[in-house]
């Protein structure tokens, strides 16, 4: 996720599709980031991938919407196991611990 964010900031004209682990040693880890040019005619005309050309898909990596970002946010679980995770851990904490009174005090 950190690697996706760094590459997304550096090459802002491309969109981050996904990433995968390549290698590691005792100090560093290396990932390959799959990036897509949203203005390329082949991408825009392909119905399987042209969803990434929409304006709301800008900087998915910064908002945690790629596979690595969703994993870091703990959103790989589904169903009843994920009730304390969605929409986010912080939002659930706030929802459970905020005191809501019926009138202004």
Image (cartoon, rainbow, N blue to C red):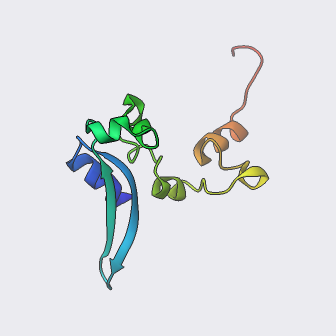
Q: Quadrant of residue 33?
A: bottom left
What's the residue at 79%, 51% (across, down)? 80
Q: Position of residue 97 (x, y in %)?
A: 70, 40
The residue closer to the viewer here, 16 or 98, is: 16
Give the mark count.
0
Q: Position of residue 64 (x, y in %)?
A: 46, 48
Q: Position of residue 63 (x, y in %)?
A: 43, 43
Position of the C terminus by quadrant = top right
What's the residue at 61%, 48% (across, down)? 89
The residue closer to the viewer here, 8 or 103, is: 8
Position of the N terminus by quadrant = bottom left
Q: Is residue 94 above or below residue 30?
A: above
> Is residue 34 in view from this perspective?
yes
Left or right, 19 with respect to 99, comes to left
> Is residue 58 in view from this perspective?
no
The residue closer to the viewer here, 26 or 79, is: 79
Q: Quadrant of residue 32?
A: bottom left
Left or right, 35 with respect to 85, comes to left
Left or right, 39 with respect to 68, comes to left
What's the residue at 58%, 56% (across, down)? 74
What's the residue at 72%, 40% (across, down)? 96
Q: Position of residue 6 (x, y in %)?
A: 27, 54
């Amino acid at each position: 996720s950190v690697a996706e964010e760094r590459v997304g900031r550096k090459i802002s004209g491309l969109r981050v599709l996904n990433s995968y682990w390549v290698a590691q040693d005792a100090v560093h880890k290396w990932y390959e980031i799959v990036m897509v040019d949203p203005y390329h005619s082949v991408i825009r005309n392909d119905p399987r991938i042209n969803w990434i050309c929409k304006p709301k898909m800008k900087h998915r990596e910064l908002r945690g919407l790629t596979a690595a970002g969703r994993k870091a946010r703990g959103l790989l679980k589904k169903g009843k196991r994920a009730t304390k995770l969605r929409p986010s851990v912080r939002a659930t904490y706030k929802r459970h611990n905020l005191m809501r009174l019926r009138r202004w005090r």
